[in-house]
């Protein structure tokens, strides 16, 4: 994950109060102070963060969430077209994979706002060979696929499980029509709409 995204995720999930410094953000996310400062400045330009001599402060959680969402670019490791249902793919997943998107909503909240044809996971790229071997007998041409497994690169800073803020950003940034019912559900259910309050 890019440095600014790590910082925005930390601010949104840790909700540091009453204020935080660039150094706090850098230490918590493993980025340089310069990168943390740039991420905070982007939040300030969006009206999501404010700064005074005592430090940075969250002004609008929802604006910061959208600042992250419009800039979100996960690193794609692979897209596997599979002759298996999404439920079968989810059920046979490596235990180290982190579910995101529709699968996270279905598996962790037992809610299914829409059907979906893709399973999204974050995985350490070093485990890619093991994952591919697990599904090797079900890989087909895209036109024959029942589902698609989308693998994004996981890094050492990814929380387990992924926070709902990150699942929301993944869904919001997707161009697929079936992603929208899921992120709209999260806005209300988890309090990510800027009106219902945190969690």
Image: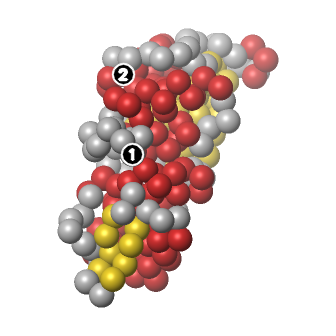
- Quarter in which the C terminus is drawn: top left
Is residue 92 at all visible to an observer of this figure? no
- Nearer the observer, 139 or 104: 104
Q: Which mark is residue 194?
A: 1
User: Residue at image x 51%, y 51%?
Assistant: 66
In the displayed orientation, state which residue is furthest to the left: 18
Q: Position of residue 98 (x, y in %)?
A: 40, 38
- The residue under the point 48% across, 30% down is 184
Percent coordinates x, y for residue 138 in the rendering: 61, 17
Residue 173 position in % (x across, y down): 59, 43
- Labelled disc at residue 112: none
Q: Is 198 above or below relative to 38?
A: above
Check disc 2 and report the residue beneath it: 107
Residue 29 occupies quadrant = bottom left
Front residue of 113 and 107: 113
The answer to whether 17 is drawn above or below residue 66 in the figure is: below
Above or below, 64 against 124 in this view is below
Q: Nearer the viewer, mark 1 or mark 2?
A: 1
Q: Which residue: 34% across, 60% down?
A: 10
């Amino acid at each position: 994950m890019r440095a600014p995204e790590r910082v925005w995720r930390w601010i949104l999930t840790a909700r540091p109060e009453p204020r935080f410094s660039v150094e706090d953000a850098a230490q918590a996310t493993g980025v340089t102070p310069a990168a943390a400062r740039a991420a905070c400045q982007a939040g300030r330009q969006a009206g999501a963060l404010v700064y005074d001599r005592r430090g940075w402060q969250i002004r609008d959680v929802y604006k910061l969430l959208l600042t992250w969402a419009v800039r979100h670019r996960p690193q794609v490791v692979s897209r596997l077209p599979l002759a298996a249902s999404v439920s079968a793919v989810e059920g046979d997943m490596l235990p180290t994979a982190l579910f995101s998107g529709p699968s996270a909503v279905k598996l962790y909240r037992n809610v299914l706002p829409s059907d979906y044809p893709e399973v999204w996971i974050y995985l350490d790229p070093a485990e890619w060979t093991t994952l591919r071997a697990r599904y090797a007998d079900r890989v087909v041409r895209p036109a024959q696929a029942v589902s698609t497994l989308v693998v994004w690169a996981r890094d050492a800073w990814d929380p387990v499980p992924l926070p709902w803020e990150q699942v929301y950003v993944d869904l919001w940034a997707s161009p697929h029509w079936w992603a929208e019912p899921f992120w709209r559900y999260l806005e209300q259910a988890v309090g990510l709409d800027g009106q219902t309050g945190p969690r």
